[in-house]
Every structure is written in C-alpha cells, then in structure tokens.
Amino acid sequence: QVQLVESGGGLMQPGGSLRLSCAASGSFFSINVMGWYRQFPGKERELVAQITSGDTTNYADDVKGRFTVSRDNAKNTGYLQMNSLKPEDTAVYYCNAVVGAIYGREYRGWGQGTQVTVSS
C-alpha cells in the first residue's frame, strides 16, 4: 500500500506563497495520480488540484492561475505551489495518491493533513 507524509503548511499573509510537499512510501510500482484536497470547517473535502502519471493536471476553478501541482517521480514526492494566497484558502490540505502495485492492483492513500492559514 502507500503511506503519505505532508509538510509545508503554516501561516501566511494574503498575497504570499507556500509550498506543500507530499512524500509517498510503501509497496508500489508507480504513482498513477497524486492529488491535493482541502477541507473547510464543517464541509467535505474538495479537490484542489491533481496530476497524473502522464503529467496531465486538473485544477479547481478558484485556484487556477495561482496554484501549481507538480511531482518528482525519482523522489516519489508531489508538490503544491500556492501563490497569491487569499484568506479564503484557509483550510486543512490533504494529499492523496493512487498507486499501482503488484498484480495490477491499485491502492489509495491519504496524508495526515496540514493546516494552511492565510491571515494578516
């Protein structure tokens, strides 16, 4: 399966930048999809951005042009670069990965979540 460890959250002023990282480990051959979700208090998790093994990316409308998702296959690590942060970006951010394993199986894992707070 897959274990995901996130880092990089914190407090930032509006207009600032943060980069989240998500390191994957476990028994898998490939990371097929790596995604970033966020959760506001009292709400369900929502997709922020994702990147496939073919480097196809997908973004939520309200982060397009501000956030960039990327991956380093050699390090089994994904990144979410967040620029021009707004107070409404304040949430807990989770990484998610779908990995390919033996016998063609796929497994899905979640990171522990990291708090991002945008405030002056």
Image (cartoon, helix red, strand yellow):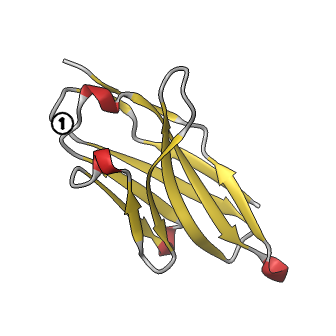
Q: Secondary structure at mark 1?
A: loop
Left or right of 9, for residue 118: left
- In the displayed orientation, state which residue is furthest to the left: 15
Across and down, in percent, residue 113 comes to: 55, 36
Compared with 81, 84 (above or below) is above
- In the displayed orientation, state which residue is furthest to the front: 61
- In the displayed orientation, state which residue is furthest to the top: 120
Q: Nearer the viewer, residue 26 or 109?
A: 109
Task: Say which residue appears at 64% left-offset and 64% top-offset.
Answer: 98
Task: Say which residue appears at 43% left-offset and 67% top-offset.
Answer: 71
Give the labeled residue for mark 1: 16
In terms of image quadrants, where is residue 84? top left
Across and down, in percent, residue 76 comes to: 54, 67
Compared with 117, 18 (above or below) is below
Q: Nearer the viewer, residue 47 or 72?
A: 47
Q: Nearer the viewer, residue 39 or 102?
A: 39
Left or right of 97, for residue 47: left
In terms of image quadrants, where is residue 24? bottom right
Compared with 28, 38 (above or below) is above
Q: Nearer the viewer, residue 99 or 42?
A: 42
Task: Say which residue appears at 37% left-offset and 51% top-offset.
Answer: 60
Across and down, in percent, residue 34 comes to: 53, 61
Categorize mark 1 by other alpha carbons within 10 Å: few (<14), some (14-19), many (20+).
some
Say what amino acid the circle numbered 1 marks: Gly
Specify the quadrant that holds the C terminus.
Answer: top left
Specify the quadrant that holds the N terminus.
Answer: bottom right
Across and down, in percent, residue 104 comes to: 79, 80
Task: Say which residue appears at 58% left-offset and 53% top-offset.
Answer: 96
Left or right of 11, for residue 58: right
